Image (cartoon, rainbow, N blue to C red):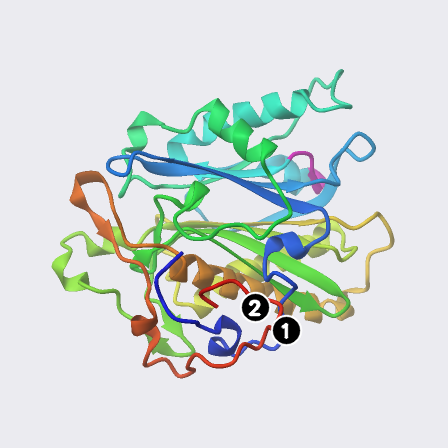
């Protein structure tokens, strides 16, 4: 956890939707998260994060799902079938770019071992990635099958750890150390939970105020150090259909811009949204505004959480990604104050 005093992210970002009980994606019923960190503390900083909807079981082989691609310079394995059919058949695994293909194979192995898949001959594994090669020796492809299986097997409904953990271990974003972040917001009678893997470029901006990273001028490869991609997973218990989930996924990618994303040529900006609700009639489109707002706010908060919880990390070739601190936010237009979300009790918020 980042070393900083209490920061009320909800107030800092002037959000209007209440946060969920744990302010995380696991506030959505049945959604669990597992992570495996792979690091030697020097040249290797990588890992796996798995989002596991427990509704995918023997009785229910798929969930409504859709994807939105803000900029497609990346890999989201399984995306074309989701776009075509609107179904999620497996958990969602996030990892490093060159480990994505091994992770997909491991995910298939895990699924084929599950009850109800004894006769399965086709699966659509869903794996997203960001490039951790600035801090980690990505060519060694350090993420192995056992790391992926461990993340899937150990997934729980507890609040996930954030920052430099799992698939976020080697990430950097907006000039700071990035990583895994999560948040949730109420959208009317339903919950929207978001988990992000932040690794994208731009200038961190809080309600119009730019926040420059430390020692930026001293890094000759500062632009590369900013990062270049973002994976966003959106979950909801609202009974929305695949088309409507596509609309929610768009809002998640749009939310990156509120914090200063510049959507560069080399950025892979993806959102994948699914519903854990029991099948029923989808709500009318004019009633979706509360879910749209909740998606935007949860994504914005998850991104900021990923930065605030990421420790300064020195990795490959002595490169350093600096963690965002309270001092960096001190002159922000909204200061830390009494928590607007009493349900969140972890240190650091």
Q: Nearer the viewer, residue 8 or 138?
A: 8
Residue drawn at (21%, 56%) of the image: 222
Decide: is 19 above or below 59: below
Quick check: marks 1 and 2 in contact, CB under 8 Å? yes
**Where does residue 225 sit, x and y in percent of width and height?**
25, 52
Using the numbered discs, state the Cα–Cα distance from disc 1 to disc 2 in whole angstroms: 7 Å
Decide: is 44 above or below 219: above
Q: Earlier in the sequence, mark 1 or mark 2?
A: 1
**Where does residue 295 sit, x and y in percent of width and height?**
61, 63
Badge 1 marks a residue whose secondary structure is loop
**Where does residue 51 sit, x and y in percent of width and height?**
59, 42
Which residue position is annotated with label 2? 297
Q: What range is drawn magenta here?
A: 85-90
Decide: is 63 above or below 237: above
- Which quarter of the picture shows residue 257? bottom left
Residue drawn at (36%, 27%) of the image: 141
Which residue position is annotated with label 1? 17
Badge 2 marks a residue whose secondary structure is helix
Q: Nearer the viewer, residue 303 or 264?
A: 303
């Amino acid at each position: 956890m980042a070393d900083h005093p209490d920061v009320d992210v909800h107030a800092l970002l002037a959000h209007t939707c209440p946060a969920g009980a744990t302010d995380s994606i696991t506030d959505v019923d049945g959604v669990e998260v597992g992570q495996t960190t792979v690091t030697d503390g020097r040249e290797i900083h990588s890992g796996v994060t798995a989002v596991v909807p427990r509704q995918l079981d023997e009785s229910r082989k798929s969930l409504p799902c859709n994807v939105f691609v803000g900029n497609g310079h990346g890999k989201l394995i399984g995306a074309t079938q989701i776009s075509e059919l609107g179904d999620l058949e497996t958990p969602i695994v996030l990892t490093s770019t060159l480990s994505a293909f091994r992770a997909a194979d491991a995910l298939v192995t895990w699924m084929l071992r599950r009850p109800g898949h004894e006769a399965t001959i086709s699966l659509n594994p869903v794996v997203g990635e960001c490039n951790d090669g600035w801090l980690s020796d990505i060519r060694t492809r350090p993420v192995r099958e056992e790391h992926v299986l461990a993340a899937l097997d150990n997934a729980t409904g507890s609040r996930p750890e954030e920052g430099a953990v799992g698939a976020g271990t080697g990430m950097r974003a907006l000039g700071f150390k990035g990583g895994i972040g999560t948040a949730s917001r109420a959208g009317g009678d339903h919950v929207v939970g978001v988990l992000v893997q932040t690794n994208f470029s731009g200038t961190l901006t809080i309600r119009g105020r730019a926040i420059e990273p430390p020692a930026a001028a001293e890094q000759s490869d500062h632009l590369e150090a900013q990062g270049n991609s973002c994976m966003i997973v959106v979950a909801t218990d609202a009974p929305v259909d695949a088309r409507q989930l596509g609309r929610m996924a768009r809002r998640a990618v749009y939310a990156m811009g509120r914090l200063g994303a510049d959507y560069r040529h080399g950025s892979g900006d993806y959102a994948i949204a699914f519903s854990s609700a029991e099948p029923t009639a989808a709500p009318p489109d004019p009633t979706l505004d509360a879910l749209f707002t909740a998606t935007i706010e949860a994504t914005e908060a998850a991104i900021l959480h990923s930065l605030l919880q990421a420790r300064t990390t020195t990795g490959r070739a002595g490169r350093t990604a600096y963690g965002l601190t309270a001092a960096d936010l001190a002159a922000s237009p909204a200061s830390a104050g009494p928590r607007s979300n009493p349900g969140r009790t972890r240190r650091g918020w």
